Image: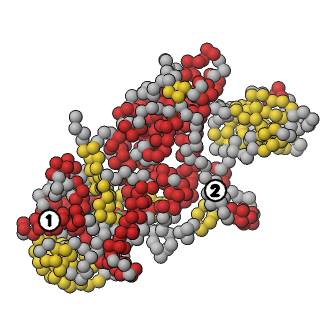
Amino acid sequence: MTKKSFYITTPIYYPSAKLHIGHAYCTTIADAVARYKRLTDHDVFFLTGSDEHGQKIQQKAEEEGVTPLAYVDKIVAGFQGLWQKLHISNDDFIRTTEERHQRVVQEIFRRIYEKGDIYKGKYKGLYCTPCESYWTERQLADGKCPDCGRAVAEVEEDAYFFKMSRYERRVLEYIEANPDFIQPVSRRNEMINFIKQGLEDLCISRTSFDWGIPVPIAPDHVIYVWFDALTNYLTPIGFLDDIEKFEKYWPADIHLVGKEIVRFHSIIWPCILMALDLPLPKMVYGHGWLIVDGDKMSKSKGNVVDPLLLIDEFGADAIRYFLLREINLGQDGNFSRDALITRINADLANDLGNLLHRTLNMIGKFQGGVVEKALGESAIDRAFLDEAQKTIDAYEREMEGMKLQSAIKTTWAFISRANKYIDETMPWALAKEAAKKQELTNTLYNLAESLRRISVLIEPFMPETAAKIWRQLGIAEDFSAVRLADVRAWGGFPAGTHVASPEQLFPRIEVTEEKPTAEGRKGSTTKSQEPQKKQKAEKAKHDAPADGIITIEEFRRVDLRVAEILRAERVPDTEKLMRLQVSLGDEEREIVSGIAEFYTAEELVGKKIILVANLKPAKIRGIRSHGMLLCAKSEGSLTLVEVDAPAGSAVS
Ligand code: MSP
């Protein structure tokens, strides 16, 4: 059976500067959608690229004393490097300076000219160079460019015009008849209002600079950048040279764009396509903008965030996860370093990392590393499996509706549910009773199967992590061949599989203090920023607030866990020290504690206490003590803080 095709595009980015985190946000969304469509067995074509012509690029190149092509070559190589590091899975990268594209643009110009929809006239108007946009007096905002707020210049020159006014009624009818064409709905209403004010003919050539594609019938004119740029969507899918390919992918399923360029994609582009008698794209999705610490990014404010630096520091998957999890697709969203670190620690290191670690550890310890076949199920298992099914149904619904953030939340709710399932079933307790062997096997099977599912569900968001989990689960099947349908029914984990020993997915980020980042902003220092660490620690001491207040981030660094005391014995030749074996659910530890004056060994066994689990191990009387238990202190006595919760539970 032939697969259904799916064509998704990002805007092609201007190489007027390096890309920032806002551009990375846009491409990451498109990548997640493309990956999801591949998972649902579509024949996907995912396109991104660079929009390399125009006056601004020419000016930039002149400032640097190089040719425009030399200038863009360097910057575009940077784009491609960034997409590689961010695991972007585009099927092609279109540069508007490529010969294949020039042929398409000129051919389109010719066809529309021959049809009589392009004519020569005089352009007199207002031009915003940074936005490469023409405006009428009426469209200006306080006399300035309505998009970027900068000054516009009056220009007058011979020019070719595209008869866009001719298509005004048809494009409006199309938008009104196709409620899904412009998403989200708020953008659709804006566009309808815009058209209702009247569409003027569009100036599509310039003579005042020459860095562009020549007009085929008048080589002293270059084609206006937006006319050149929009047609990029036709070039790589065989518009001129591979009709079969073209018919497979056109019309595009989604043009994903930022909110300020929805107008070009949902009005101008459809008019051009109508003039060419081509079908219109199925959807133009206008996503919101990423702001940084509550502010619009700009060079002058010095708050432009470089995605490459972030990837180097935190890894691509953590950045992808943050962007997709934190921001509701149609709305503006905020990037902050502290929010990123909080997400990494809470969602990735704790929730996901712990689930994998605990599961693999227990399979290693209780079943020699082998996932065995499940037989039968308890009420607890049933409830858990029901949740797993609901998760996959909701996930599919949300991904199909472009609700990426909701799909991530759904997946993470299931990850938390799986962690809870460990606490409910207490495999360490089952392991102690021979009669519970099958129950233990079932629990561990269900956990392994959950992780198999989770790895597939997170692949669109975190491809590298998904593959890492798959590898650690030891499943022989090639991960790249796995589809969503393979995890729709419960029980696909191959019994008899040997899992690997757990490897950490995301180390917790230790935050020490605020520091100005490479971009000149304030941000948290992490472990990876070793060099000035000592000096900073000293400074932090002085800067510590006098009132002893700590931030939530500082508190979150403490990993508090419920631990059950399994054995206790007094450390010989001491009065105060007790040596304790404690269970953290999937792990046993030894600690030494100064409580021997207040509790006997017999009193301690069986108590469930709270342990500081991430305290650096220390040697006390030659014994390695790994953790510290919490006690209440009052007038010469100590009372253990006891809780009635399963061993291993996180305390927060
Ligand atoms: N070259 C045109 C697009 C032509 S498509 C036929 C262009 N380029 S751009 O480099 O200025 O912007 C490309 C995309 O990046 C736009 O969709 C824009 O919305 C997006 N973003 C730029 N800054 C952004 C944020 N701060 N946040 C999110 N997206 C942002 O326009």
Q: Residue at x 67, y 65 (%)?
A: 532
**Where is residue 372 shown, x and y percent of the image?**
52, 22
Q: Is residue 69 above or below residue 525?
A: below
Query: CA separation, marks 1 and 2?
Result: 56 Å
Q: Residues within 10 Å of mark 2 (few under 14, many from 20)?
A: some
- 215 sits left or right of 431 in the view: left
How did the renderer colour the structure? secondary structure
**Within the displayed image, which quadrant is ligand 1 positioned in?**
bottom left
- 645 sits left or right of 71 in the view: right
Q: Is residue 129 above or below residue 232?
A: below
Question: Is residue 415 shown to the viewer in this render?
Answer: yes
Viewer-nearest residue: 451 or 636: 451
Question: Is residue 139 shown to the viewer in this render?
Answer: no
Residue 454 - label: none
> On the image, which quarter does residue 153 sit in?
bottom left
Residue picked out by circle 1: 107
The answer to whether the beta carbon of the residue marked 2 is less than 8 Å from any atom of ligand 1 is: no
Q: Residue at x 52, y 20 (%)?
A: 378
Disc 1 + disc 2, Cβ < 8 Å: no
> On the image, which quarter does residue 186 sit in?
bottom left
SS category of the residue bearing label 1: helix
Q: Residues within 10 Å of mark 1 (few under 14, many from 20)?
A: some
What residue type is disc 1 on?
Glu
**Where is residue 639 shown, x and y percent of the image?**
81, 38
Looking at this view, name the residue that lies furthest to the top.
Answer: 435
**Where is residue 502 shown, x and y percent of the image?**
58, 37
Residue picked out by circle 2: 527
What residue type is disc 2 on?
Lys
Q: Residue at x 26, y 65 (%)?
A: 98
Q: Is residue 264 above or below residue 247?
A: below
Q: Residue at x 24, y 58 (%)?
A: 233
Image quarter hosting the N terminus? top left
